[in-house]
Image (spheres, rainbow, N blue to C red):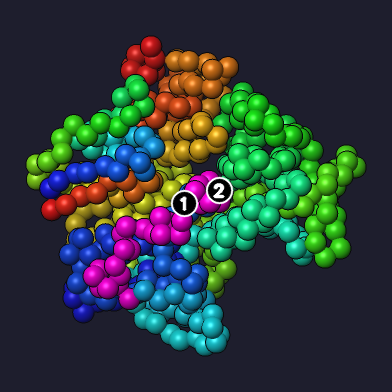
């Protein structure tokens, strides 16, 4: 296999993890790792938290797996973007961002890790309006925060929005958090848990507006305010837009891949012959949940590693299992660590602590009385225990006993 | 293999415990305890996975 070439499209967490795994599995051929940012792969979670707060520096973002690309013998190509793909001929178009020159690259194996980008508000071109996805975004926003704006308005109370609001508030800034839904995070949490996050922010002095959308952003060249759907105008010196992400798939529109809210893969993350997709861009057929796409850090690591092994298995004939992890994520806001293992459902049962204490373990239970997930606040051990129990198809009573008390 | 944890970085996310419960344990006090600083060869894959999956990259392994 030493004469083969594997291209990893996307130099981020999942891509870097895949490259490292290829080497660890003994792959001796060429690895090209192609990324459109100017930075070697780095860790994004601190961007909305300690890095934004100025408590963590650039070096601390560096991924250990990519500490030394030369030692890993990975050809790291930055400032370059995959711009086209032909899965039949196993060729990629790669475009330099510096001079727009495009070259054709053939591959024996392809790992698609092009990730996702922040969704923007349409038609907005005002200074002082930010999304937060990359370290460059974080640098710009951090500079704005350090300049001491009179008020920061965060649009969207998802995890990124809520974390940015918490960081801004802890920096002593006045913050308004605007959410179009009646409660935040309703796709990932139950209503009461969403409202507990609202209470957490209100308790720290954030002005949280729920159930009201944004009509338009006000300003000439620079933002001056946010007009809500009810006509209210909130003065704003800085606006942060946290309304989700869009998977980066346009480059593969004519490739022969199935594209539908991500690169559609089978249960083993295979998207085409000799091509796997991993990380935020991958939408695979999870044995428990059907077609899903994960935007979580933990999944990027796990799937990056899995995808690399999957690709090699196609050549060695090693057996391949479906990729079937129990999802998990965490969010740090103020001094709370919020973690979900598994998936939410309509019935909830708190088995330890309480919402009022802001420290609890809550089980999600489906219509048949089976546990589907566990939400914890400042209970990290129980979150990971829950993940293991869910993975073993534990019954409700077993989870109550293990996580309660 | 020698396992060290930078406790200034560690935030007790407990992901290491899920990967290698024989070596890492987050207890009810929310602190991480390393149960075995010199895990045997049979645990090396799990411990490597734990180190990779630590969101704080707080775990260092020396061969």
Protein chain holding label 1: A
How far separated are the C-alphas under marks 1 and 2?
8 Å
Q: Residue furthest right?
A: A231
Horizontal side of residue A75 vs A140, given as left or right: left
Count the numbered circles shown. Answer: 2
Residue found 55% across the figure and 34% down from its top = A334
Label 1–label 2 contact, CB within 8 A: yes
Q: Is residue A312 above or below residue A163?
A: below
Front position in the image: B55 or A237? A237
Horizontal side of residue A191 vs B34, given as left or right: right
Q: Are marks 1 and 2 on the same chain?
A: yes
Q: Which residues are magenta?
A: A49-75
From the top left corner, tell me how far across and down residue B33 is, in percent: 25, 31
Q: Is residue A265 in sight in this rendering? A: no
Q: Residue furthest top?
A: A405
From the top left corner, tell me how far across and down residue A152 is, in percent: 72, 47
Q: Is residue A155 above or below residue A375?
A: below
Horizontal side of residue A181 vs A296, given as left or right: right
The disc placed on residue A81 is none
Identify the residue position indicated by label 2 in the image. Answer: A53
* Disc 2, SS: loop
Residue found 18% across the figure and 31% down from its top = B35
Label 1, residues with CA under 10 Å away: few <14, some 14-19, many ≥20: some
* Disc 1, SS: loop
Identify the residue position indicated by label 1 in the image. Answer: A56
Label 2, residues with CA under 10 Å away: few <14, some 14-19, many ≥20: many
Protein chain holding label 2: A
Residue A24 magenta? no
Front position in the image: A375 or A275? A375
Residue found 79% across the figure and 49% down from its top = A236
From the top left corner, tell me how far across and down residue A104 is, in percent: 43, 85
Residue found 12% across the figure and 48% down from its top = B1
């Amino acid at each position: 296999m030493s004469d083969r070439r594997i291209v990893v499209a996307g130099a981020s967490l999942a891509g870097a993890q895949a490259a490292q795994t290829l080497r660890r599995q003994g792959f001796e051929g060429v690895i090209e790792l192609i990324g459109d940012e100017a930075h070697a792969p780095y860790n994004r979670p601190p961007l909305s938290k300690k890095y934004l707060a100025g408590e963590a520096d650039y070096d601390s973002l560096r991924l250990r797996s990519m500490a030394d690309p030369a030692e890993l013998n990975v050809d790291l190509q930055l400032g370059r973007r995959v711009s086209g793909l032909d899965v039949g001929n196993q060729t990629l178009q790669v475009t330099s961002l510096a001079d727009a020159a495009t070259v054709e690259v053939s591959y024996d194996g392809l790992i698609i890790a092009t990730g996702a980008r922040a969704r923007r508000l349409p038609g907005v071109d005002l200074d002082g309006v930010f999304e937060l996805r990359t370290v460059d975004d974080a640098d710009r926003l951090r500079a704005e925060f350090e300049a001491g704006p009179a008020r920061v308005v965060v649009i969207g109370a998802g995890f990124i929005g809520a974390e940015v609001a918490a960081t801004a508030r802890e920096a002593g800034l006045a913050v308004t958090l605007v959410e179009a839904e009646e409660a935040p995070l309703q796709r990932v949490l139950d209503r009461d848990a969403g409202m507990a996050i609202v209470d957490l922010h209100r308790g720290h002095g954030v002005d949280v507006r729920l159930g009201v959308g944004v009509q338009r952003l006000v300003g000439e060249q620079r933002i001056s305010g946010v007009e809500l759907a009810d006509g209210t105008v909130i003065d704003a010196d800085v606006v942060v837009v946290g309304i989700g992400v869009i998977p980066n798939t346009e480059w593969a529109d004519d490739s022969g891949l199935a594209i539908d809210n991500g690169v559609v893969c089978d249960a083993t993350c295979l998207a085409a012959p000799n091509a796997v997709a991993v990380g935020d861009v991958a939408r695979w057929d999870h044995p428990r949940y059907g077609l899903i796409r994960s935007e979580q850090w933990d999944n990027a690591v796990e799937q990056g590693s899995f995808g690399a092994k999957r690709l090699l298995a196609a050549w060695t004939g090693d057996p391949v299992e479906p990729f079937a992890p129990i999802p998990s994520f965490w969010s740090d806001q103020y001094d709370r660590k919020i973690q979900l293992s598994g998936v939410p459902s309509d019935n909830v049962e708190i088995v330890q602590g309480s919402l009022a204490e802001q420290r609890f373990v809550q089980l999600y239970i489906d219509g048949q009385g089976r546990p589907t997930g566990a939400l914890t606040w400042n209970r990290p051990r129980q979150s990971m225990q829950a993940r293991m129990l869910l993975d073993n198809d534990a019954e409700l009573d077993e989870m109550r006993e293990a996580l309660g008390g | 293999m020698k396992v060290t944890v930078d406790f200034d970085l560690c935030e007790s996310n407990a992901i290491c415990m899920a990967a290698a419960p024989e070596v890492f344990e987050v207890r009810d006090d929310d602190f991480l305890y390393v149960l075995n600083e010199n895990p045997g060869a049979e645990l090396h894959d799990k411990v490597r996975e734990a180190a990779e999956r630590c969101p704080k990259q707080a775990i260092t392994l020396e061969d």
